[in-house]
Image (tube, rainbow, N blue to C red):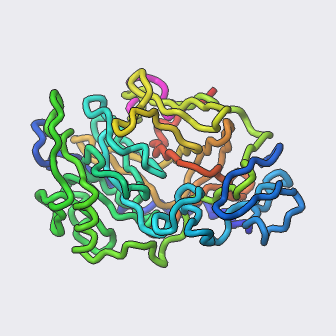
Amino acid sequence: MKRVKLLASTLLLACVLGGCGEHEVDSPIKDVVSEPIVTEAPGVELEEPSLEKPAEESGEVTEGSEEQAATPTIGEREVVDGMKQSYLTGEWKDEAVVNRRPMAVMMPNNKAAMPQYGISRASIIYEAPVEGRITRLMCFIEDYDDLDHVGPVRSSRDYYVYEAMAYDAIYCNWGLAIPYVEDLLKSDRIDNVSEAVKGIHNPSAEAFGRISRSGYKTEYTGYMFIEGYEAAVERHEYETEYRDTFEQAFTFANDGWPATYDEYENATVIYPGKESGNKGGYGNSGAYFEYNPEDGLYYRYQYDEPQIDELNNEQLAVSNVVFKICHGEVRDANDYLAFGVHGTGDAYVFTGGKVIKGTWSRLSDSGANYFYDEDGNEIVFNQGKTWICNIWKEYSEYMEWE
């Protein structure tokens, strides 16, 4: 089904202003398809797809160009042998995992905090600048049943909270920028599991604790423990399954079909902010993604080395990377940042080694981020994990790809 491209004149909401972390606890520092691919769907023997296969048999079909129309997409999710296709990745997972709301965990991304633990379990990673012009991550994790803990966990900024709402996630943080986040987390607009610190009115102390890390500052030793998280969710009486307000994460290509976009520009090494020292946040870490055509994944690098997960010592890799260009500004002399994550703006979607230029649109707190190509057709993502970089429009000149 073709979605109508939303008007670019939609106003960005003023409520998405960010803040600083000076109130953090224990811190000493204030479609073209060339040929089908086959994936294993549980209990289903896949036949080789045909371009003439009707939409009702293979999911929705994105209208537009002849090439895009050839990419069947996942429609309504069905349960097959206790498995279901994830709303966050499109992959087949246990039905209980797919139905439950993900946790959205704030994690530091500065060099002194590396490595993070459990980050490779994130189905979506959202990255945005904070004061000091470094970036911080928010990790949407639905696969956590066999995890003991994740982290380190860091403090909240309100533009992350608003992005968490788009995925009906339960927001998890240790600390907050009190002037801009306190009332938001206090309200009933976002279900949150937050460490018991100043400014938090519904604390979840049972979910958090410290792990000794020799040579690390105190603020990089705080973790969230899964057993405590589940206890807090139960005590707060949060709904554990997706609510009716949840729309979608992305539109994914259906089983057996890659979204290859053969007519689009190649982009196999991509930088959200290449130039060192630029004040858009990404130049500090030298972050980039390198595409591997053999497995169709983008491998993440920063600080001149692969970014790894301490859990398994494996490099982070995703199927899709998104540059979401947002209005941004400095709020005051403390370099508190503001980002517009509602409304509309430019977007660049990287998948299958290609780059698709278009727009993003999001009109409400619970509304999804929709991504459209320049003809107004919704962009089809390849199944797998996605990394979203929130890029300040003023500094978008520093993004590059080759």
Residue 379 at least partly seen: no
Is the magenta region chiefly helix, strand or loop? loop
Where is the C terminus found, in terms of image quarters? top right
Q: Position of residue 348 (x, y in %)?
A: 60, 44
Q: Position of residue 347 (x, y in %)?
A: 58, 47
Q: Name the one closer to the observer, 245 or 234.
A: 234
Q: Name the one closer to the observer, 23 or 122.
A: 122
Q: Position of residue 345 (x, y in %)?
A: 55, 52
- Could you tell me which residue is drawn at 23 percent across and 67 percent down? 232
Span of residues in magenta: 272-279
- Could you tell me which residue is drawn at 27 percent across and 41 percent down? 335
Q: Where 119 sits versus 245, above or below?
A: above
Residue lying at the far right of the rendered structure: 52
The answer to if 342 sits in the magenta stretch is no
- Could you tell me which residue is drawn at 55 percent across and 65 percent down? 248
Q: Position of residue 168 (x, y in %)?
A: 43, 67
Where is the N terminus found, in terms of image quarters? bottom right
Q: Name the one closer to the observer, 260 or 158.
A: 260
- Could you tell me which residue is drawn at 30 percent across and 48 percent down? 150
* Side (left or right) of 247 relative to 243: right
How many labels sit on residues?
A: 0
Residue 70 at least partly seen: yes
* Side (left or right) of 122 relative to 222: right
* Side (left or right) of 222 relative to 55: left
